Image: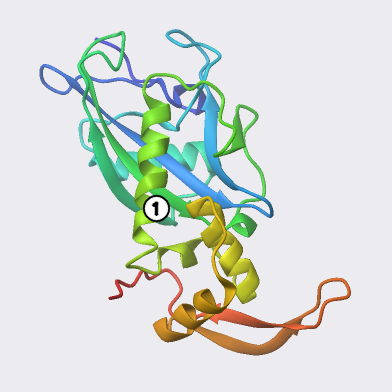
Amino acid sequence: MWAREDGLDSLATGMSVAGDFKVAADVVLFTAREQDLAVLLVRRPRPPFDGRWALPGGLLATDETPEAAARRWLDEASGLRELYLEQLYTFGRPDRDPRGRVLSVAHLALLRWQHLASLPSRAAWWPTGALPALALDHGEIVATALSRLAAKLEYSTIALQLMPECFTLSRLQAVYEMILGGPLDKRNFRKRMQALRCIEPTGESWRGGNHRPARLYRIKQPGRVEIVK
C-alpha cells in the first residue's frame, strides 16, 4: 500500500487504496494575469518524476468525494477552497502512472488574480502557452481543461469567474482572447456582452495613460455561472 502523506509534500504525490485500483483528484486552476492565462503547478518532491512540475492533486481519502479532495488539494497548494470548481473528466489510461493503476478525476477551477496574495515555495503560476514538461499525463489534463473553458465561452458566462470586482469591457475582452488564443472583433464582443445582461456599469470610470476614461463594470451575480443561448 502507498501511504498517504500530509502537508505540502503530499501535493501531486499522495496515494491510497480504492479497491483494485486507486482514485485521485487533480485540479487545473486557471487565473487571468495582466498578460496571460496561467495555471497553478507544484514541484514534485520525490519519485516518480521527482523535481517535475505537476498539477495539485493526490488520492482520495476513504471518506472523501472527488470534489472534496480537489478542494483539499487546492487549500494545501494555495490556501483557497471557496472558488469556482467543476468536474472536468476522468483520466484512466492504464499506463498513466508507473506505480500502478490510478484513475484521476480531474477538476477545472477558476480564480480571480487579485484574490491570491502568496503561494508556498514549491508552487508557482505558469503561462498556459509556455508550460514545462509535466509529470504523468498532466499536460493532457491541462489541454483538456483549456479546451473545456474555451468551449464554455460560447454558451455560458464562465469567463466572469476570472474577473475582478470592477473591470472595463476591454479587460473582459482581453480575458476572452487569452482563453481563445486569438483576437475578437471589439464591436461584436461588446454587443454580445450587453445582450447577456450579466454585467452592469458601476457608475465609475478608469483612465489608463492618455486614453479616454473607460466605464467600469461589475458582475450582477458574482459566483454564478449562467447558461446562455
| Left or right: 228 in relation to 8 | left
Quadrant of the frame with the N terminus: top left
Please provide percent x and percent y for residue 35: 68, 51
Please provide percent x and percent y for residue 67: 29, 45
Residue 58 seen anywhere in this rendered image of the structure: yes
Which residue type does callout 1 highlight? Leu
| Left or right: 6 in relation to 91 | right
Rendered view: 41 above or below 207? above
Q: Quadrant of residue 129?
A: top right
Outermost residue on the right side: it is 210
| Left or right: 202 in relation to 69 | right
Quadrant of the frame with the C terminus: bottom left
Q: By what rule are the colours in the image chosen? A: rainbow
Instruction: Name the residue nearer the viewer: 175 or 86.
Output: 175
Crowding at dot 1, Cα within 10 Å, few <14 / some 14-19 / many 20+, comes out as many
Please provide percent x and percent y for residue 90: 23, 35
Q: Secondary structure at mark 1?
A: helix
Q: Quadrant of residue 170?
A: bottom right
Outermost residue on the bottom side: it is 203
**Tag count in the figure?**
1
Rendered view: 44 above or below 91? above
Rendered view: 104 above or below 96? below
Residue drawn at (51%, 11%) of the image: 50
Residue drawn at (36%, 23%) of the image: 137
Residue 164 seen anywhere in this rendered image of the structure: no
Instruction: Name the residue nearer the viewer: 146 or 138.
Output: 146
Residue drawn at (83%, 77%) of the image: 211
Rendered view: 177 above or below 215? above
Please provide percent x and percent y for residue 26: 36, 34
Q: Which residue is mark 1?
A: 149
